Amino acid sequence: MARLLRPLLRGTTYTRLLHLWVPMLIVSVWLFIDMSTPWMPAAALVPVGLIPAVRMGEGVQARLLLTPGEQDSGISVNPSATWRDRLRTVLWLEVRMGLGAVAMASCVWLPALVYELVRIALGHAPDGGIPLLSEAQPHWAYALLVPLPLLALYGVVVGLGELVTAVARRLLGPSVAERLAALEERTDQLLERNRIARELHDSIGHALTVAVVQAGAARAAGDPEFTDRALAAIEDTGRAALEDLERVLGVLREAERPVSSRPTLAEADRLLESARASGVKVDMDVSGPLESIPGPVSREGYRILQESLTNVLRHAGAVPVRVRVEVTGSTLVLEVRNPLTADIPGPGRGSGLRGIRERAALLGGRARTGPDEGDWQVHVELPLS
């Protein structure tokens, strides 16, 4: 019994009923004007539904009254963009008015029928308001029929509410173009989240690796001068990481913030200096103009170089590193090589190499990582177009 009464305790049941009653206000006004043409409001809905803004208004009203509080209601609030959208809006208006007529008639006549049955059961003669009972004779047995119209009213109120909501999702739901646009937006959001995750991994991971290596070297060296240099390198790297962290947090706070402030390969010197301060001997060979590299390619190239140097510090230690950057007419080649050594314990589960491959793939390039002639090699080719 409690489960049966539960829909009557929900506010949504009554907002849906209100949604069905609203069109009947227009019908009631028209019947005061001309009762001989009750079909006129339904006919007038055809040209009204062809107006693009009507679909948006109906969508807003349906969301507010049919699915209050739902995050994903399945109902669009955009104007009609195609003739298909316009025709669906017209059909929706006609169906809504038809269901509203059923709801209004049921909410008027079913309570009146209950009242009349109670009167007859109490011994009063029917007043003729209900044609079905106009010839009925007073008798207590009519009290047994009172629950029937109440159950019918319950079914109308709850059932029509569910039905009109399902119809709204069908006729006012997103079109194919809107679903594709929503899917593209969701894909862009996921790509942006992955990009931010890579940014944090590369920047913060590099800074922490440099700090750990420098601190360990300073403690082992026991040289005050070397310790001062190590602390200065940790400070510089930490400040750069804080700048990157602040920029990434700014992207999270402001969805439309541009990414043009990200470092590019033209600023690769600070990466090399950071690595050299950690005891790594880095030789860099650059051929071709770095300033001619498109912004997206140059920014991703910087992060690939950063992650490659971080991996050297983390897994190989202070070993010689050879960096080659070559800019041709259509391709950027970035190569980082270091001698293979025994594994040095350190954090990480291969996410750095995976990030390098992901960055290259997103730009339509390719990346090779692994042993090569006694060296560990990261070889990346990125198209410039």
Image (cartoon, rainbow, N blue to C red):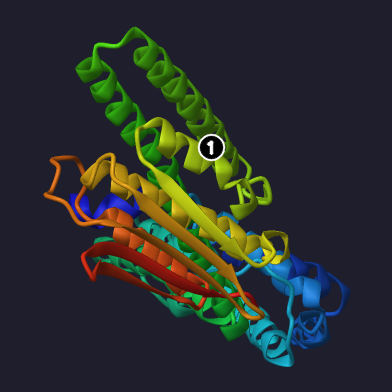
Is 136 displayed left or right of 264 in the figure?
left
Residue picked out by circle 1: 244
Q: Which residue: 39% across, 11% down?
A: 225
The one of 298 and 5 positioned closer to us in this rendering = 298
Which residue occupies the extreme right position in the image?
Answer: 33
Q: Is residue 219 above or below residue 365?
A: above
List x then y, in percent, for residue 366. Answer: 42, 76
Front residue of 18 and 250: 250
Which quadrant would residue 50 be assigned to in this image? bottom right
Q: Nearer the viewer, residue 372 or 158?
A: 372
Report the residue at 42% width, 23% height from top: 234
- Where is residue 5 drawn, in percent x and y? 27, 52
Q: Is residue 49 above or below residue 307?
A: below
Compared with 182, 216 (above or below) is above
Q: Amino acid at mark 1?
A: Asp
Work out whether 267 lies above or below 365: above
Q: How many marks?
A: 1
Residue at (62, 76) in percent of width and height: 328
Residue name at image x 45 percent, y 57 percent:
323
